[in-house]
Every structure is written in C-alpha cells, then in structure tokens.
Image (cartoon, helix red, strand yellow):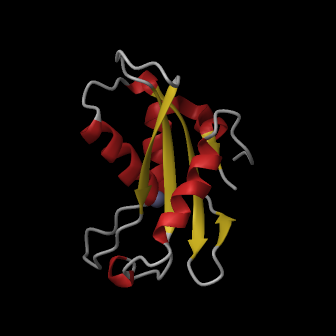
C-alpha cells in the first residue's frame, strides 16, 4: 500500500471525507468505523475531455446480518460499475482507502480486508497492492 497517488485519488478521498462529517451512524452500527474508498477509473469515451480520469466513492455499510457487511472498497467498485456499466476491468486504475474519524476529523491508513483483497486481486492480479493507496 502506497502513500500518495500521482493521479489525485488520495486527494479525492480527502475531499470526499469532508462531506461525511454528520453521517448517520446507523450504517456503521457494527464496527462504529467509517471507511472511505475512492476508485479511480479511466474516463469512459465521452465528448467532454476535461480529465483523463473519473473517481467513484464508496463507504462501508453495516446492517448487522449474517451475510456480513459491505466494505467501502467493494461498495466503490460496485457503485462504479452501476454508474458506468460499460466499464471494462482494465478501466480500473487504482483505489485509495482510509478510515475517517468523524470526531477528530482525521484520516487514518487502513488495509483492505481479505475479501476486498480478493476483489482487488480479480482486478489487478497478484500485484494488486501496487494499485492501493492510503493517506
Ligand atoms: Zn473489506
């Protein structure tokens, strides 16, 4: 896991965190943690060429059921595919992930869990950790 993305993904993560200060904790009632992930994608073919990349955010959602919770990383990936169904696997460039403490407003590094690691391995192969950034 690396510190800073030269594509701006960690910067997008910090910007997104500022929108989550008053987030309802119902959705985090298991771990009480708020995890943010931002996935960086190659911009789909559109007429607007203001940036080479686009970013989609995800946060952890915990409903306390036996099937488990949805991690921020998998939520970001799923949201990206939902938002841009034409995406190809190779359009996924990198992901940034961090835990956001809504009391201190600090972002802290966090590693993807084993299940998210399996998802990221499907995208980027055995070197998937080269595509994972934190703050
Ligand atoms: Zn996970």
Q: Is 44 situated left or right of 127 in this image?
A: left
Q: Quadrant of residue 9?
A: top right
Q: Say above or below: 56 vs 84.
A: below
The one nearer the camera, 59 or 128, is: 59
Residue under the point 48% across and 42% down: 39
Q: Is 20 situated left or right of 3 in this image?
A: left
Evaluate whether residue 117 shows in this view: no
Q: Pinpoint residue 135: horizontal percent, then vertical percent.
A: 70, 56
Residue under the point 27% across and 24% down: 86
User: Disc count in the image?
Assistant: 0
The one nearer the camera, 4 or 125, is: 4
Q: Pinpoint residue 125: horizontal percent, then vertical percent.
A: 53, 30
Q: Say above or below: 69 vs 120.
A: below
Q: Is 94 situated left or right of 32 in this image?
A: right
Residue at the farthest right position: 3
Q: Pinpoint residue 45: horizontal percent, then vertical percent.
A: 36, 16
Q: Quadrant of residue 59?
A: bottom left
Evaluate whether residue 2 shows in this view: yes
The one nearer the camera, 14 or 35, is: 14
Q: Say above or below: 112 vs 9.
A: below
Q: Say above or below: 50 vs 118.
A: above
Residue under the point 67% across and 67% down: 108
């Amino acid at each position: 896991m690396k510190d800073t993305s030269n594509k701006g993904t960690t910067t997008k993560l910090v910007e997104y965190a500022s929108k989550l200060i008053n987030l309802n904790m119902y959705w985090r009632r298991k771990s009480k943690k708020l995890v943010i992930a931002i996935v960086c994608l190659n911009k789909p073919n559109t007429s607007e060429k203001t940036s080479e990349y686009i970013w989609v955010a995800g946060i952890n959602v915990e409903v306390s059921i036996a099937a488990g919770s949805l991690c921020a990383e998998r939520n970001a990936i799923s949201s990206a595919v939902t938002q841009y169904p034409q995406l190809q696997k190779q359009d996924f460039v990198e992901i940034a992930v961090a835990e956001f403490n809504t009391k201190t407003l600090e972002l802290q590094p966090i590693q993807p869990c084993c299940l998210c690691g399996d998802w990221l391995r499907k995208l980027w192969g055995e070197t998937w950790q080269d595509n994972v950034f934190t703050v």
